[in-house]
Amino acid sequence: MATASKIHLSPETDSGIFSSGVREDTARTASVVLQEDMANHHVFFNDEGFHNHIPHLLLSIYALGGSPEDILAAYNNNKNYQRPSVPTVVEVINDMNDTEKFQAYLGKEKHYSNFLSFFQRQIDEKGVGAVLNEYVFAGDGRAESMLSRLFGGLIHPLIHLGFGLEFNQPAIVAQALAQAAVHDDWMGRDFFLPAEKLAEGIGKPGKKSLLQLLDEIRKDNTLAHSAKYTDTNKIRDGVLHRAPQEMLKYAAQYTVSEDQVEERLADMINNVVYYTSAAQRPSKVVKLDFFFIHCVNSSIFFSKLALLPILDQRTRLRLLEWKGRMDLLMYVSRGCPDLLRDEIIRYPVTNEWPAVFARGASHPSDDGHLAKFVRAVAHGQNVCKAYESKASQTMPVSGNMWLQIANMAIDSTVEENRTMWIRSTGFDEAWEHLPGRARL
């Protein structure tokens, strides 16, 4: 049985939102190595705040129908560069029961192990739902700070939480909360909360699709050029420094009312998959943007979050609104690349879905990003199928395009000794080092 300190996967109960032939032997192997990872490794694998992706990678391989050998190969490929876990301090863990002291420890990575132990205790005592509602969604100062941190670090804490909830693993949820606690919360102060205020609250009917807002943003010269390739942090030092009001104006227009949940969910998934795959340069080899893929890889979990019984409806709507606003901000921060639908439509399919999943699960160099991406794309096809006939003007990905996009992801990441992803596709500088595309 899975607990806040023990990882235990079962194909009968923990197959996930989207899976393809999960195996009992893979579940057993994944449970063992995920437990080892939790016991031995820090949340960051270096001093620059780069994340340990082992849980994301192994759970994705498991969901894609990977074998125990795939799990062990992936774990062994990624465990050697991880930082060791830091010993806990009992006095600090006890201090965290006090709200003021809890907040004093936030944002300090040295306390990750302490936060992990604290949230494990809290979940054991109160359950996952009660802890989430108390520490992330209560609406008080502590919870607002934690919610903001959940979206920090390229939304890795949110992705981690999604995996924990999707696969019914309280220990992964505890990891996610500890991970959020050691991130910063400036995104909330500078973007999410001001956008929410400008929108005049939560749950107003959304009048514009994500695609409409992306098109309007691209035509707004001030906003579209607010990030520079040389910016250290293109969100903080670029968009929110040079065009904060313009960004907030568009972000505030992405809202979700109670009767729009399913359609807005499909709209969000469809368009983040679209702008990630359509941001190409025809003269260059096909590559997917490393930053954009995080918007895709987190999208799958909103099929769980949008309907999660342990959260109230206001919280579910709020999460969907924040996700859509994050997607808009990410697009602007990468230079608002032109979106070329023909690049997808003309792409050849050489792998059907079973081959895509097998290659994603056994990729020799993947740290989790590729496996997460192809699973999220396959899930997106299922979610958006119901809207293909009536939403073609707002949801540009349809039909065989989903499989074509998955093939783009596989084909563009298989070559050895070459960068798997491009970073910031809207800037000429990002493409300069890439080879030209072969022509017939």
Image (cartoon, rainbow, N blue to C red):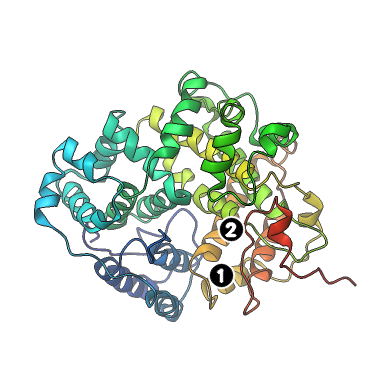
Query: Is disc 2 surrounded by few (<14), some (14 to 19) or many (20+) residues within 10 Å?
Result: some
Kindly identify the amino acid type of the residue bearing the numbered disc 2: Phe
Percent position of residue 245, x then y: 58, 26
Residue 393 drawn above or below residue 196: below
Q: In the picture, which quadrant includes the N terminus?
A: bottom left
| Residue mark closest to the camera, 2 vs 1 | 2
Give the mark, 2 or 1, whose residue is nearer the N terminus.
2
Residue at numbered disc 2: 290
Q: Real-space Cα distance between discs 2 and 1?
A: 16 Å
Residue placed farthest to the top in the image? 200
361 relative position to 144: left or right = right
Residue 307 visible in the picture:
no
90 relative position to 269: left or right = left
Q: In terms of secondary structure, where does tag 1 sit?
A: helix
Residue under the point 72% across and 43% down: 396
Residue under the point 14% across and 46% down: 125
Q: In the picture, which quadrant includes the C terminus?
A: bottom right
Residue at numbered disc 1: 360
Percent position of residue 384, x then y: 62, 44
Q: In terms of secondary structure, where does tag 2 sit?
A: helix
Residue 412 lies in quadrant? bottom right
423 relative position to 49: left or right = right
Between 193 and 208, the residue placed more toward the observer is 193
Residue 266 visible in the picture:
yes
Residue under the point 44% across and 80% down: 73
Residue 438 lies in quadrant? bottom right
Between 232 and 216, the residue placed more toward the observer is 232
Kindly identify the amino acid type of the residue bearing the numbered disc 1: Gly
Percent position of residue 248, x then y: 56, 28
